[in-house]
Image (cartoon, rainbow, N blue to C red):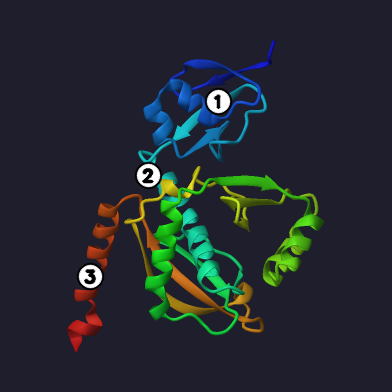
Amino acid sequence: MAQMYTITLPDGSAREMPAGSTPADVAAAIGPGLAKAALAARIDGELVDLTRPFTGDAALALVTAKDEAEALDLARHDYAHVLAEAVQALFPGTQITFGPSTDDGFYYDFAPKDRAFTEEDLPAIEAEMRRIIAADKPLTREVIARDTLIAQWRAAGESFKAEWAAELPEGEELSVYHSGSDWYDMCRGPHLPSTGKLDPAAFKLTRVSGAYWRGDQKNAMLSRIYGTGWLNKKQLGDHLTRLEEAAKRDHRKLGA
């Protein structure tokens, strides 16, 4: 008989799930509506992917769009990864570095092969991001041995990623997230189950600037692309309206 784990939900109810089960399996067992709405999970308080297997009895809370703060951070993190994938698809030879979420969106720093990016590049990048989102590519986690990952980055010409991986503490688990089968980035996660969980109408790339690698002016100059990202089109529209209203009240313009 298969080993069973007791999974306790926030309302105090419990479900018996076989070893190897994931939060996604629990969501599906509860109902198709929750299975569709679930974005991530907290297992014993730790935010994880829906596909992270249970390792024993656990307390489980499923994260949906109703958990807005967590859902927004997940979405913005994923928009950053989709941005990086889109840029590398459009501009082969571009190296990727880092791309975090921010208070109202995300950014990603790149080392372009030929020239710095400009705001004229943004419409094409947005279109490619929407294509990746529409493809609904699964986002899957893989733990990789340090030396193997460093060798992979170097072989791919990703010197910035190789440098960073080599400097992470010994013994730290290194993981990458695959977007489908043709792109990946080094990341702790968690991520949404797939690119299709993002709303293609809920983000906008906003500007481009320069940024030094690791914030040190002695290092290489990178191209940073900023974007704002939300859970739905209405949230994006409201945000853009707030920015427009703030610009109208700008004391520098009013004074002039």
Q: For the point 26% across and 64% down, which residue is it?
A: 240
Q: Which mark is residue 59?
A: 1
Q: CA distance from mark 1 to mark 3?
A: 44 Å
Q: Amino acid at mark 3?
A: Glu
x and y percentages locating residue 242 in the rendered image: 24, 64
Q: CA distance from mark 2 to mark 1?
A: 21 Å
Q: Quadrant of residue 212?
A: bottom right
- Lower position in the chain sequence, tag 2 or tag 1: 1
Give whichever of 35, 246 is nearer the camera. Answer: 35
Q: What is the x, y in percent for residue 245?
A: 20, 69
Image quadrant in which the C terminus is located: bottom left
- Tell me the residue that label 2 is attached to: 68
Real-space Cα separation, disc 3 to disc 2, in angstroms: 24 Å
Query: Residue shown at 29%/58% (left/top)?
Result: 236
Disc 2 packing (10 Å; few <14; some 14–19; many ≥20): few
Question: What residue is disc 3 on?
Answer: 244
Does residue 224 appear anywhere in the picture?
yes
Query: Residue 249: in sight, yes or no?
Result: no
